Image (cartoon, rainbow, N blue to C red):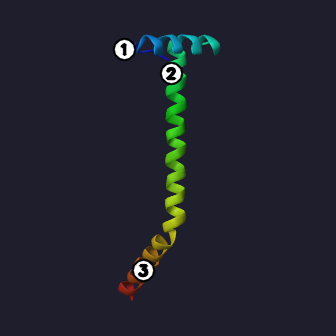
């Protein structure tokens, strides 16, 4: 996979923390940052899917009613 170089300015403390944590995990700083981004975006996707599930759980009856009304209207027009 091709790699792109990114540049970021962070406090000295943050830079040292990143280096230390990457070393603890046996990763380069770049790989550590990539892992953080992946973990964050995977979590975002999971939270989005969970929110969609809660929305449908709460509102599914409305969608079902609208779909039934649409079918009934189409059936009335077909007759």
Mark 2 and mark 3: Cα distance apart in space: 49 Å
Q: Which residue is mark 1?
A: 9
- Asked if the residues shown at circle 1 and circle 2 are in contact, with their CB atoms under 8 angstroms apart, the answer is no
Circle 2: is it few (<14), some (14-19), or many (20+) Cα within 10 Å?
few
Q: Position of residue 37 (x, y in %)?
A: 49, 27
Q: Quadrant of residue 31?
A: top right
In what element is the residue under mark 3? helix
Q: Earlier in the sequence, mark 2 or mark 3?
A: 2
* Between marks 1 and 2 in the image, the one whose residue lies nearer the viewer: 1
The C terminus - image quarter? bottom left
Residue displayed at 61% across by 10% down: 23
Mark 3 — residue?
Answer: 69
Q: Position of residue 4 (x, y in %)?
A: 41, 15
Report the Cα–Cα distance between label 1 and label 2: 16 Å
Name the residue beneath numbered marker 2. 34
Give how far apart the Cα atoms at labels 1 and 3 are: 57 Å
- The percent position of residue 35, horizontal first and vertical second, equals 55, 23
**Mark before the other along the chain sequence, 1 or 2:** 1
Classify 25 as above or below 43. Answer: above
Q: Residues within 10 Å of mark 3 (few under 14, many from 20)?
A: few
Disc 2 element? helix
Decide which of 62, 25 is in the foreground and name it.
25
Q: Which mark is residue 61?
A: none
> Residue 50 location in percent, x, y?
54, 51
Element type at mark 1: loop
Label 1 Cα crowd, 10 Å radius (few <14 / some 14-19 / many 20+): few
> Most extreme residue toward the front, as rendered?
13
Specify whether 25 is left or right of 5: right
Observer-side mark, 2 or 3, equals: 2
Q: Earlier in the sequence, mark 1 or mark 3?
A: 1
């Amino acid at each position: 996979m091709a790699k792109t170089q990114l540049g970021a300015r962070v406090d000295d403390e943050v830079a040292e923390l990143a280096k230390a944590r990457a070393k603890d995990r046996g990763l380069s700083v770049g790989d550590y940052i990539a892992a953080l981004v992946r973990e964050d975006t995977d979590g975002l996707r999971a939270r989005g899917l969970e929110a969609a599930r809660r929305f449908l759980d709460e509102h599914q009856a409305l969608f079902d009613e609208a779909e039934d009304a649409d079918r009934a209207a189409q059936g009335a027009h077909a007759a």
